[in-house]
Image (cartoon, rainbow, N blue to C red):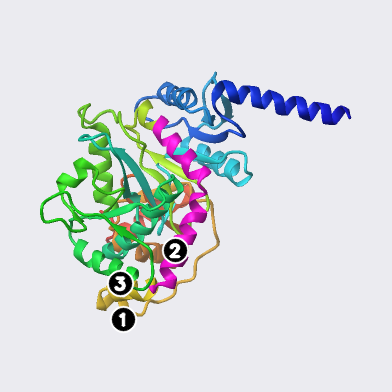
Amino acid sequence: MAKLNEALAGAFTDMAEGLVSGQFGRKLRIGLTLTDSEHGEQELIRAAEMAARQNADIEPVLIGDVAEAPFELHPASSLHECHQVMEKLLDEGKIDGCVTLHYGFPLGVSTVGKVVTPAGGKEMIIATTTGTSDTQRNIAMVKNTLAGVALAKASGIKKPTVGILNIDGAAVVERALRKLMDNGYELSFTESSRADGGALMRGNDLLRGTPDVMVADSLTGNLMMKIFSAYTTGGSYEAQGYGYGPGIGEEAERLIGIISRASGAPVIAGAMRLIADAAAGDLLKVYSGELKAARDAGLNDILQELKPKAVAEKATETVKAPPEKITDSDIGGIDILDIETARDVLWGKQIFARTGMGCTGPIVMVAKEDLEKAREVLIAAEFIA
């Protein structure tokens, strides 16, 4: 009886708190790493305070090296340590998602961000903004479409509209997506706001936020994110939007969202909101559903058709990976088309390496003790200067 009374008292307390805050049920615990921002740790703490004040359903959890913090704090002295703590908290289910920067996603995982357009204050998802879904651009953009649609649906948009930014390869991507649609995959193209319409989006559509999901390659999407976030500040401080978004792809196992070193408190707070929405909407499960539906509609065959003939016919030599190590250092400056070959060259020299994507492009991740030797090997093989 005592336990029942205690449970009832707790339930009434939760209900009373819900009536005051407007929030019922468990809060979403969203992590935030505090290291390596160009604006300092206090800007990140201010962002967490904004997120908690503006969103009754978010409970910030901080990861970093500060003496005092207004929320639960997990110590970590470097960004690498922050990422280790973050991954442990996610794997143990102690946080629902996390916002960080300069995180090396594996090849095949890209981030999907969200901006607020200047013309009418419309929210627009940009797929994708960092990382790479595939080394072939057109194939990557088809995959980016699925990721963008998944984030839109997880965020509460039941039937998101899609537009393809009119860049190189856009028409090829549109044809591939229409084949998927003809085979039964559900997708809703929007129409350009320009008089001639069509699913290919112009710069006007970027500013107006014509589609719910704007599809592009990651480098173009990254450029758009920076412009939308910092066009009012001169570029040094990202003041608007929701950050570069969660990493989405077949190999994404954790809900991790990205900000940049230039992101200010308003964007970081927005990024925490976006990750909370993704957690509440079970984003990774939604993406798996979209991927399955697309594969049922012939995705694999359609992507095979998009491969350049030389690539499709090339027989790749299998290189056995050396024993795994903790990869806590990275090397950038390698072209995306060469990134897997560069990894294989390192494997051939018995240097364990992983491929990934940093904030500025493709990276090879290696153990700290192998860093100098790996650089020497990649310079000798002319992958980096």
The amino acid sitting under disc 3 is: Lys
Judged left or right of residue 93, residue 315 is left
Q: Amino acid at mark 2?
A: Leu
- The residue where tag 2 is placed is 291
Q: Is residue 9 left or right of residue 143?
A: right
Between 206 and 310, the residue placed more toward the observer is 206
Picture layout, residue 125 above or below residue 39: below
**Mark 2 Cα-neighbour bin, 10 Å: few <14, some 14–19, many ≥20:** some
Q: Residue at x 16, y 50 (%)?
A: 202
Name the residue beneath numbered marker 3: 179
Q: Which of the two marks, 2 or 3, is nearer to us in this view?
A: 3
Looking at the rendered structure, the secondary structure element under dot 3 is helix
Query: Residue at horizontal 55%, vertical 23%?
Result: 21
> Can you see residue 307?
no
Q: Which is more toward the observer, 93 or 16?
A: 16
Q: Report the span colored magenta.
A: 269-298
Mark sitting earlier along the chain (2/1): 2
Q: Position of residue 325 (x, y in %)?
A: 54, 55
